[in-house]
Image (tube, grey):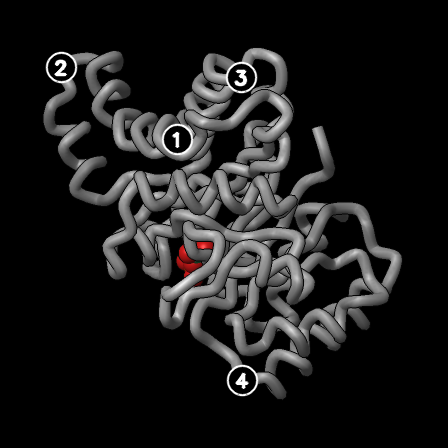
Amino acid sequence: MDKKLVVGNWKMNLLREEARELSGALVNLLGEGYDACQVVLAPPYTALEVVRNCISASNVDLGAQNVFGEVRGAFTGEVSASMLVDAGCRWVIIGHSERRHILGETNEQIREKVSLSISCGLKIILCVGETEAQREEAIRKSEDVLTRRRFLFSPIRTQMESALRSLDEKQVSDIAIAYEPVWAIGTGKTATSLEIAEIHQYIRELLTEMFPGSGNNVRILYGGSVKTCNIEDIVSVEEVDGVLVGGASLSVDSFFKIIKSVGG
Ligand code: 13P
């Protein structure tokens, strides 16, 4: 498996000057040759170019937060996978819960985004995770452990099977799965080590069932209120191959500490 992966998802934050300062300061702190883990910055589209310039001499990669599922054409306001490559992106986040739940993105749209992005050579961070209501329903319906797990895992199975079904063994090695329980995003609530381990093990089982040849090499990240105060616990979970960080990636001090905790 590749090195652990730390992704900073800036969401709809930072003007270009702020983006320049943050990415420049991060590269200074890490040092240009830092490669103990793979670091990816995903700024808003408007800041892709300034961040690309700041990180160009380092091992930090550029990522986008979204992409459209068509090659080109009359889709006002959208950005294609080849445009992201042209802007210097190596990565794209697809299926983030804010896009699924606030912007109504469907599993079918996510599948199209995945397959077009792969065909353009982008690496993908595919987000999956259950809502609070889905987790509570699983607990309520659970007569036994197996039933509880079946209900808990079901939304994740649906999201993954739908997004990955058209990929082959080679293509799936360009994907990282980010398990982000929706109830933990931006709330300060984090899944416990046991909860993370349980879902990551399930995601691994599903990956190896779908891709017997390469499912074991796909990195599985955790996301949802990752902070300096909980990163040590999260990264000590054996099944965690990296983290997807929102709020704490907007401060150079906290993001640097998180990277160092993951990579050393
Ligand atoms: P927070 O780290 O702010 O909870 O956001 C997580 C997230 O959505 C990263 O993609």
Asked if residue 43 is positioned above or below residue 211 in the image, the reply reads: below
Among the two numbered marks 1 and 4 on one chain, the one whose residue lies closer to the N terminus: 4
Residue under numbered circle 1 = 160
Q: CA distance from mark 2 to mark 4?
A: 51 Å
Among the two numbered marks 3 and 1 on one chain, the one whose residue lies closer to the N terminus: 1
Q: CA distance from mark 2 to mark 1?
A: 26 Å
Q: Are marks 2 and 4 in contact (CB under 8 Å)?
A: no
User: Which x, y percent locates residue 204?
Assistant: 50, 22
Among the two numbered marks 3 and 4 on one chain, the one whose residue lies closer to the N terminus: 4
Helix, strand or loop for disc 3: loop
Residue 236 shows in this picture: no
Among the two numbered marks 2 and 1 on one chain, the one whose residue lies closer to the N terminus: 2
Residue extending furthest toward the bottom: 17
Residue under numbered circle 3 = 211
Residue at point 62%, 19% (across, down) = 214
Quick one: label 1, few (<14), some, or many (20+) residues within 10 Å? many
Q: Quadrant of residue 158?
A: top left
Residue at point 40%, 34% (across, down) = 163
Towards the viewer: 226 or 124: 124
With 177 as the anchor, is 53 left or right in this view?
right
Residue under numbered circle 2 = 143
Quick one: label 2, few (<14), some, or many (20+) residues within 10 Å? few
Residue extending furthest toward the front: 73
Among the two numbered marks 2 and 4 on one chain, the one whose residue lies closer to the N terminus: 4
Towards the viewer: 186 or 104: 104
Identify the amino acid type marked 1.
Met
Residue under numbered circle 4 = 15
